[in-house]
Amino acid sequence: MRISTPLPALVLAQALLVDALPQGHRTVRRAEGPQFSHGQPIDGKGKGAPILGGTNKQIDLQNPDNLGQQSTDNGVVPNLKWSFSDSKTRLLRGGWVREQVITDLPASHDIAAAQQHLTKGAVRELHWHRVAEWGIVYSGSILVSAVDESGRYQVEKLNYGDIWYFPKGAAHTVQGLDDENEFLLVFDEADFDKVGTTFNVDDWIAHTPKDILAKNFGVNASVFDSVPAPNPYIFNGTVSTKNVTDSPAGELSGNASFVYRTFEHPAESVPGKGGEFYKIDSTNFPASKTIAATFVRLEPKGLREMHWHPNAEEWLYFHKGQARATVFIGSTNARTFDFSAGDTAVFPDNAGHYIENTSDTEDLIWIEIYKSDRVADIPLTQWLALTPPDIVAQTLKIPLDIAEGLKKEKQLLIQS
């Protein structure tokens, strides 16, 4: 007697035939060839077997490398991936926020992040952090306002690709300007949710005696009778039309500016011709002393060349497209991960890796973040090319002419 299985009919026809005998036993006849693209851990060469128990089919299909697709993977490598879709979304009047912190991705020791959405006029209330905040707009436009310890201020409208960096302790706020606005927030502290990291102004005022408030501001205490408690975090408002003027210390501008407009600056040279690579660190954005970043666009089937970072972990946010990366952490341990838009990842300090655009038609766009003052990487090919070629040939057991022909210049993004 033949019965159906929980697998979709197409997968059943292409991958597996499951028979249930009257006694309740099952036998499986396996289709030929690897079955990773059908969500089954079968390599087609005699290794693996079908999943017969509970599984999330959509996750299996999105992550074929978790099923053992890469035969070069080996050893134990911790999970280095987290999707914002797995984060709890906090709904607020005027928007929402969802985070990725160390409890979500324990391998990320340096960085936490969040996606945040503001409707028109909505305000992320006035606040400051014990850590630095870095942000990039990827939809809509926003108004950022900040004040530093010298009383210098900055009020700027930011659009797609524009970046801000608020140092530890700098007072700031963000307001949505378009109908819908969204951005990525990054913090140089992985345990960002812990008490003592973020300080909201209305929360402080609501927990200060009224007579102290009256004395501090030189007004009647009743002025503060309507201060929200608990603080709203995000609230609906109207778009700001008032200008800040007459600051004794002046504005934050030039090298002191908290704002960097990515696409108003030239991209890095990409000898590999595989896309665009923007570097944003203290060398061109002097205010950003603890967070360095890149904005990368990789063409279909292109490759971010094999490399490692000598100065920091690499935290990533995939904004668009599909990707694959293998991370080598030493001592024969390597693991391959599949990524899609909305995923975050972390590659350990000095771990070798690449990033491949697995789409035939769509660009891959992602952002790299480092808890550092600069972006630094060492490409594998360049290292080997600048090492005596006979030593390279002997080490890798490759022909000498191949070792002598390796490219001596960083390729960064390699065209397919």
Image (cartoon, helix red, strand yellow):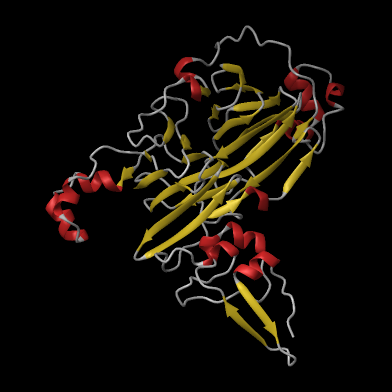
Left or right: 242, with 210 as reference point: left
Question: Within the image, what quadrant is residue 176 found in?
Answer: top right
Quadrant containing the N terminus is bottom right
| Horizontal and vertical percent position of residue 87 | 67, 51
Question: In the current view of this chain or complex, which residue is farthest to the bottom?
Answer: 23
In the displayed structure, 386 sits above or below 107; it is above
Question: In the current view of this chain or complex, which residue is farthest to the top?
Answer: 246
- Residue at screen point 24% across, 46% down: 383
Quadrant containing the C terminus is top left
Left or right: 155, with 203 as reference point: left
In the displayed structure, 168 sits above or below 12; it is above
Q: Is residue 247 visible?
A: yes
- Count of numbered badges drawn on the protein: 0
| Horizontal and vertical percent position of residue 5 | 72, 74
* Camera-side residue of 78 and 212: 78
In the displayed structure, 86 sits above or below 321; it is below
| Horizontal and vertical percent position of residue 34 | 50, 68
* Camera-side residue of 26 and 393: 26
Q: Is residue 208 visible?
A: no
In the displayed structure, 54 sits above or below 128; it is below
- Residue at screen point 82% across, 36% down: 229
Question: Within the image, what quadrant is residue 199 found in?
Answer: top right
Left or right: 222, with 5 as reference point: right
